Image: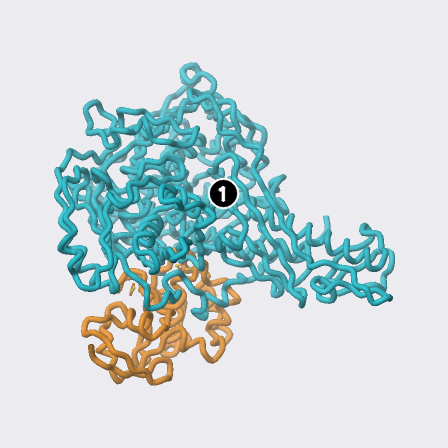
Chain colours: A orange, B cyan
Amino acid sequence: MRKISFILNGEKRSVYVEPNDLLLDVLRDKLGDKTPKYGCGRGDCGTCTVLLNGKSVRSCLILAVEVDGQEITTLEGISKGGLTELQKYFLKHNSFQCGFCAPGMIVTLEEFLKKNPKPDEEEVKEAISGNLCRCTGYVPIIRAVMDYVKNK
Amino acid sequence: MEELKFVGKDIPRIDEKEKITGAARYVDDLDFGPNLLYAEIVESPYPHALIKKIDTSEAEKVEGVVKVVTGKDFPFKFGLYMKDRYIFAQDRVRFVGEQVAAVVARDPKIAQKAAKLVKVEYEPLPAVFDPLEAIKEGAPIIHPELGQYSHVPWFFPKGGTNIAHHRKVRKGDVEKGFKEADYVFEDTYKIPRYAHCCMETHISVAYYDLSGRLTLWNSSQSPHVQKALIADALSPLGITEKDVRVITPYVGGGFGGKAGVTMEVIAAALAVACKGNPVKVRWRRDQEFYNTYMRQQVISKIKVGVKKDGTITAFQIENFWDAGPYVEYGANVVNASGLSATGPYRIPNVKIDSYCIYTNLPAAGPYRGFGYSEMLFSVESHMTRIAKAIGMDPVEFRRKNAIREGDSLAYGAPMNPNGLIEAIDKVAEEIEWGKKEESKDPKKAIGKGFAIFWKAPAMPPNVSTTAFLKFSGDGSVNILVSGMEIGQGYHTAMAQIAAEILTIPIEKIRVELPDTDRNPYHWQTVASHVTWASGNAVKRAALEARDKIFEVVSRAYHFNKDSLYLENGKVKCYLKPDFELDLKDFVINGIMKEDGYYVGQNIVASGQFFVDFCSALQDPETSQGGHPNVHYTVGAAAVKIEVDKETGKVKILKAVEAIDCGKAINPLNVKDQIIGGLLQGLATALYEDMRFDKNGKILNPNFTDYKIPTSLDIPEEVVPIIVEVAQPDGPFGARGMAEHPMIPAAPMIANAVEDAVGVRIKALPITAEKIALALAKGEKEPDYYWHIMK
Ligand code: FES
Ligand code: FES
């Protein structure tokens, strides 16, 4: 066991972890942030995506000790201050069905749109190509993003 | 007809806010406190073997291990349609991955470590992985006791063989039909296994408290069925249905994979073994592949007779389904699709043999389309080939032979009202059928493919559903139902139906996720029937509530009940235009009369829907005589693709799909179902592919090697089309449609590939490799060896 401290969604948190504990499990089971989801455990699906110092990473591939002293943002953090502009467009476009991919998808897109505020459709597809969704066929998600981009 | 205000409108999903903020809680997100225990399963490395001995002593010694459980502790069977499976393997294992034992520990890592210390001695038995091998004389018998298993009365297992069920349909005289035909076309098609790949893996947390109450939190499509089946399985321990409670929060995708009972019964048993502690069983992604239902592989031998003018005179099909070693649910897939194996065609002479065959691959069962996605690949590939062979346009051929309202189905019952012809015409127009297109790139060819489809809800003939509706003091409503919102938009549709009748805004309605203690009975969320069945129950509940509202108001004000109506959530009176009374003013506290006394009642209502017009009791030799299906939902679809003649790579330029959902309660949701389901189907057509080794072990149980589509794989254009020919007994005319989008995907791709490059692929998936090889070798109809077991 080792104590690590990091900023989680703007708040300093400290937690004891084993050297082989995954960030995903620590966030979910020790810190109670259930927004990153387990979908595959090996970096294939993107449901566990969080931001590490503002860059999207897969929390199932990162050891918790690696984030000591760093900054983590999850969908919980993104949603805390009320719906973001992008989320409002998801709402309008029925973007998710079962919703299990939503946390990873939204975290990925929030980061992407900061970097690239006026993407074209191909760039949006590229940006979410690591986030699997089995329900929607991606079309309603892309629809929401493009509408948001257009109206910004 | 009065204008509808909520039904038929593109109302945003009522569960969307939870989902986009991360507030939606799935089972694994619930907190079970520090007493939670974790299970690790000991799985069979053999596809078929006798269990000689299990030694758990080393595992038990590991600190933190609470219990090690084996088949001896729970020699109980479970099953919805046929009881052929034990909670844990007893004396033999029948597939690689079968549960032999479980270790329960305080920490998942300890459980994993200890599970490796459980020593199991096996005596391997010969195994069989191909359904055609499994029905040969002398094949290893997978269930020696098959003849004794209890099952529903519409299954016909053959004891002493590996045939778990044989659905025969005989109509007219098929030999005579072939004689009348000018041409007879015969071929064999092969469809492999596929996986649902819900993003959320199966999970169940079970808690047997010190009083003997068993509560489960499951990711499930079937809370009430699970309650019943788990109580039944554990009934030797004195557990009855009233003791079992199943709670189902949000579910991260189902597609049939979370129907019935699979791993939840393991969690239940482990909880009983560890009384007083909740026990969590969560499948890792690889377990999700082999330890829940897959889609069955099937070999289809089809023979169709037609006249020169394109009239179909005879249809014969033998479908050999590989259902794996436990077919309790899968046999019903074979049954349901067997009854409808002709596809949506009007055919006088029919012979169908649909075999459910035991093999030693993992258990298979329902997956979006319930057998129709599988069997219509051969039918719809074949119909296009026939049309072309007799010089008829494939769309014209379908229009000519398409089943119409009142036509007799293969089992004799009449076809329901439907918009099949309208769907065909709309799709043909949208895809510009008949217009030849050339690729700008000489290395590429453009082709179009067409398919039609149908599907009936596959259900027992007596399914039931109920809705409770209750008001709060502010006039808002909670609807309690037990259909599952698995992503299809069910809750939104139910809110729209209630809103329509009660005339209150959607924002004032909440539809609650099931808890079997609290929400009334609903069979299962399968078969694409909840909008229809549960929608009827919700509608009736709303009508009952409305009636009670009018009753109270008429008692307080002495209006005739018939003079009252609702508008914008207020009670109004035809005879007294200035009268209006807001629901919130009386639904809980009643109405005060002049003398200070109150009249009223707390407005609560229930609505019920029961299927009592079906019968599965048909002649087992012909399937004639009963009425096994409630109705069919039909549709048509087409694609335009571009094929690279060198690499064989297929690019989908446009996909169009029209479905007759009777009435689209929420058109936006219906269209999004079409788009999502179509992509799921297109992937099975083009690249998803399950591989097994010689030992029956799945080789690609992960998303690196089993490819599901990403955002880069979607068609350039998808056009969903809604057709509305009302279902007479549906709520506002609606019937279900959520499984259907997937069904036509594979045959229409096969048809388009042939149209583009002249290669007819008869075994799925239609990979670039298969197309490129055929083109390189100049083979027009390559016959691929049954590719699963090389
Ligand atoms: S769970 Fe991390 S990428 Fe799938
Ligand atoms: S909405 Fe279900 S996985 Fe994306």
Front-most of residues B370 and A143 = B370
- Mark 1 lies on residue: B428
At a point 29% along the width and 70% down the height, the residue shown is A24
Question: Vertically, is B273 above or below B35?
Answer: above
Residue A1 appears in view: yes
Question: Which percent across, then down, holds residue B693?
Answer: 17, 44
Question: Vertically, is B226 above or below A145?
Answer: above
At a point 31% along the width and 45% down the height, the residue shown is B194
Residue B716 appears in view: no
Callout 1 amino acid: Ala
Front-most of residues B481 and A48 = B481
Question: Which percent across, then down, holds residue B637?
Answer: 46, 44
Image-quadrant location for residue B77: top left
Question: Which percent across, then down, holds residue B781?
Answer: 27, 34
Question: Which percent across, then down, holds residue B406?
Answer: 58, 29
Label 1 Cα neighbours within 10 Å, binned few <14 / some 14-19 / many ≥20: some
Parent chain of label 1? B
Q: Quadrant of the C terminus of chain B?
A: top left
